[in-house]
Image (cartoon, rainbow, N blue to C red):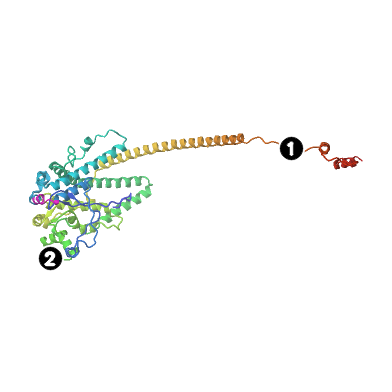
Amino acid sequence: MTSLCGTSVRAQRRKVIFLNACILLISTLMTVQSVPIDKSKVAEESPTGGQPAQSSDTGLFYDRYLREVVEVLETDPHFREKIQSADIEDIKSGKISKELDLVSHNIRTKLDELKRQEVARLRVLIKAKMDASEKTGIDHRKLLKQFDHLNHYNPHSFEPKDLDLLIKAATKDLENYDKERHDEFKRYEMMKEHERREYLKSLDEEKRKIEEAKYEEMRKKHKEHPKINHPGSKDQFKEVWEDADGLDPTDFNPKTFFKLHDTNSDGFLDEQELEALFTKELEKVYDPKNEEDDMVEMEEERLRMREHVMNEIDIDKDRLINLAEFLRATEKREFLEPDGWETVDQQQLYTEDELQEFEKQIAEQERELQKRAENLYRQREDLQKQHDLIQAQKQELHQVVQQMEQKKMQQSIPPSVPDASLNFQPAGEQGAHLVSQQIGNTQPLSPGHLPEAGVAQSHQGS
């Protein structure tokens, strides 16, 4: 059913290929849903018809190095010939790696350069990680030991041991990939139940009963779907034959069915091609438009179906189904009269004890996050106080500078000198001053003549 937290996960699928039918384990993680492909349409399409190439990624942190090594080895005719005649176990065990000594010098030179580049890349990653933790004195050789896909004792040349380590590391990592996906899905389901219970705790009694009734109704509605055919059974393949391929179910032929769904015509059904056969069954149970259907559960169901069919049919365990293996499986009783198939919602994914332990971990993580949040809040307050103090000191300093500038300007201006010609004088003094000016005049006055100022004063006196 739909996640309460609203998260959506687009499940990734992969196919494992070996160089020329099992040279090296490589996986392709597909981020789009695979659907059955009409072989006639594939034949009509040009390889360069402008169709976008499907992105592929093993999910391994050394994916690029792995692919580049494979591409270089593919160019050596001798190595290709040995791979074609090699047993799958010889490849997985590393026995085929000894053939590396016989490849051309040009190939070995390219492989040497690829390894040096990979070692340099790993050292950069190590340095970045150590710098982030503020540690110095890095011992690159010691830290390189954590990477088991190459020989760190010889970082300059690509030797048979490097190929051996690369094959074994890829095999181990890819085999663990499905388990990691199952574990992730289990945690996802426990988180859903945990959030549901926490939500119910926040409700009153009446609303809690309403939500519980709605939950049970959605579970019941989800289970109301058509019968699921057992994955890999004749009934399941015949339904694909009729509905997806548009052929008469009475004419079902296993060999034709195999060739029709070997979409890349390499003689194998890989994991991607196999998962495409389950689309019809999955559509019976899951509809993205329905609130009660969880698309994350659908992808887990797809993975379970693929694993089941691989375990039943893939005899040599190379993660590829060849025609002989497929035809042999169609002769078994399980193919003609299979048991019923229980969907993932019918499985007990976890116990109550496991859920309680999971909730304890969640509570511990929440406490740790809360503690970190409180520390960050205190640091923020301290920083704010320091900021306010700095701003106050800055303002005070600014005022002191302004005062000093004003004082400096006042000291640089000289004192002003009074202008004698503009001085104010009383009337009597002014008259005396005028008389003195007249006395100092070089021209004598005519008899009986007085200064104008003196005449004015005499008139005022009279």
Q: Residue furthest top?
A: 137
Residue 309 placed where, x, y %?
15, 53
Q: Which mark is residue 250?
A: 2
Q: Where 405 sits versus 293, above or below? A: above
Residue 391 against residue 50 in the figure, above or below: above
Mark 2 surroundings: few (<14), some (14-19) or many (≥20) residues within 10 A: few
Q: Nearer the viewer, residue 100 or 347?
A: 100
- Asked if the stretch drawn in magenta spans residue 9, the answer is no
Compared across the picture, whether 86 is left or right of 50 comes to: left
Left or right, 49 with reference to 374: left
Tell me the chief SS of the magenta region.
helix
Q: Secondary structure at mark 2?
A: helix
Q: Work out how far the residue at label 2 is from the one at label 1, CA to CA, in angstroms.
A: 134 Å
Stretch in magenta:
74-81
Q: Which numbered disc flags the more N-terminal residue, 2 or 1?
A: 2
Tell me the amino acid under the disc marked 2. Answer: Thr
Locate the C terminus by quadrant.
Answer: top right
- Vertical position of residue 70 compared to residue 276: above or below: above
What is the secondary structure assignment of the residue under circle 1?
helix
Residue 253 is labelled as: none
Q: Which residue is mark 1?
A: 420
Q: Nearer the viewer, residue 387 or 6?
A: 387
Q: Position of residue 274 (x, y in %)?
A: 17, 55
Relative image position of residue 48 (x, y in whole percent): 21, 61
> Residue 283 falls in which quadrant of the image?
bottom left
